Image (cartoon, helix red, strand yellow):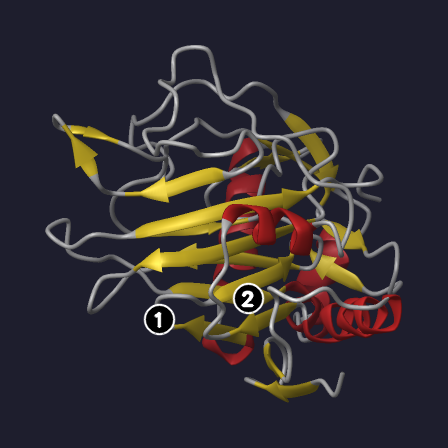
Amino acid sequence: MALTAIPLTPHIGAEVKGIDLRQQVDAETIGELNRLWLRHLVLVFRGQSLNQDDLLRVTQWFGRLGRRDRPRDESPQGLPGLLPSIMLISNIRENGVPIGSLPDGEMMFHHDRLHARIPDKGTLLYSVEVPTTGGNTLFASGYAAYDAMPPALRQALEGKRASHHYNYGSVQKGDGKGSAAFAESVHPVFRRHEETGRKAVYVNRLMTERIEGLPAAESDALLARVFDHAERRDWVYEHVWNASDLLLWDNRCSMHARTDFSPGERRLMLRTTIDGDVEPS
């Protein structure tokens, strides 16, 4: 199978062509896809007509299928036949209640499950219905942000650790939405990727609370500078969704955000995750 990967920005993202994800593929092709993933951080597969079983099969090409955590007080997903390992991201409402998670509005930059002891390794998101405008996903390269960080700022944070917390359903820090997260965590401010050996910024505006061992004012000031630097457009790819797009991203060295969209338009996405292998270091 002849794969072609077309870079989408200098730092992050590539569109993969020459593959129909409904088809069985050999180990060589899976290996090449994993190499492309490590190189580009985000892979885009357009025009893929996938069912839920296809999505689960493709997810497992890149690692162990993650389980779907849900707090006790969150109602079950409202899509008939939704498989347990698939999370529904949707603003569609039935009787005034969203059928899925994270239904509305702009969402701050974050790493998936950064608040867990072992965060997710990667995430796949498949679009079923998309609004005419908005609801785009922004991906920022943590590698590029680390490499280009002002030396004084990087030196001030090298070797430091940060604590993280997240309320399920929250899209903006302090918005009062959702319920308490099942866990909190402490991880390095800069994470060394266990497969590539490269360092990446590993804090984000939505979930990171403070830098351990520093006074609150100093921690807040440093984090504000890091957030602004890591979110610069220089190392961001913005994906404008079409129905039947599948995206895969590396959660260890990239973070992502969502732009606002009209609540009057339907947005329906299927999400799977890849379990992390190790605690960040």
Amino acid type at image mark 1: Asn
Question: Which residue occupies 25% across, 48% down?
Answer: 105
- Give the CA separation, mark 1 to mark 2: 20 Å
Q: Residues within 10 Å of mark 2 (few under 14, many from 20)?
A: many
Numbered disc total: 2
Residue 229 visible here: no
Q: Residues within 10 Å of mark 1 (few under 14, many from 20)?
A: some
Q: Nearer the viewer, residue 67 or 250?
A: 67
Tag 2 residue: 140
Q: Nearer the viewer, residue 241 or 138?
A: 241
Indicate which disc residue 242 carries.
1
**Badge 1 element:** loop
Q: Quadrant of residue 152?
A: bottom right
Question: Which residue occupies 48% across, 17% down?
Answer: 71
Question: Taking 168 as reference, is 38 above or below it?
Answer: below
Q: Position of residue 50 (x, y in %)?
A: 50, 59
Q: Nearer the viewer, residue 89 or 194?
A: 89
Give the number of the mark in front: 1 or 2.
1
Decide which of tag 1 and tag 2 comes sooner along the chain.
2
Question: Which residue occupies 56% across, 18% down?
Answer: 182
Check the image and name the residue furthest to the front. 23
